[in-house]
Amino acid sequence: VQLQASGGGSVQPGGSLRLSCAASGVIVRLNAVGWYRQAPGQQRELVAGITSGGITSYGDSVKGRFTISKDNAKNTVYLQMNSLKPEDTAVYYCTVEDSGSKLYWGQGTQVTVSS
């Protein structure tokens, strides 16, 4: 299983970014996928998740601003991030949980929100 995350970068507060995670070796349509983030000196936290059935969940700090989705045809997971705040600055990781409950991690992409 390989997860290739992209789309990170630097943006001003209030801006938007869309992260992508291209999966290989696993079918995102059949598995739960998610995004985590880790800021310097902090623990990794769940940002958003989507089940194989399409049920989404979000961390309290991003509700109403972030949207997780997946394109089954492209086997890719997305995280649309709007109204970004400096506290959203972190390395973002995509994940896929297979049918055996094993969690796979992507390599991470840096998001920096600063004026």
Image: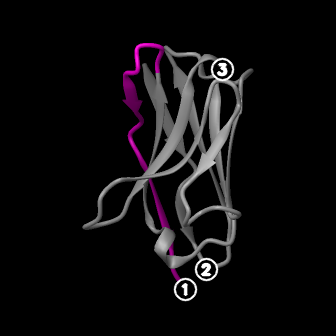
Q: Which mark is residue 37?
A: none
Contact? badges 2 and 3 (CB < 8 Å): no
Q: Earlier in the sequence, mark 1 or mark 3?
A: 3
Quadrant placement of the C terminus: bottom right
Q: Which residue is mark 1?
A: 115
Farthest bottom residue in view: 115
Amino acid, disc 3: Arg
Q: Position of residue 44 (x, y in %)?
A: 34, 54
Q: Nearer the viewer, residue 96 or 91?
A: 96
- Look at the numbered disc 3 and give the secondary structure of its residue: helix
Do labels 1 and 2 touch, CB within 8 Å? yes
Counting every numbered tag in the picture gives 3
Range covered by the magenta-colored residues: 98-115
Disc 2 target residue: 13
The residue positioned farthest toward the left in the image shown? 41
Q: Secondary structure at mark 2?
A: loop
Residue 47 x/y as whole percent:
52, 53
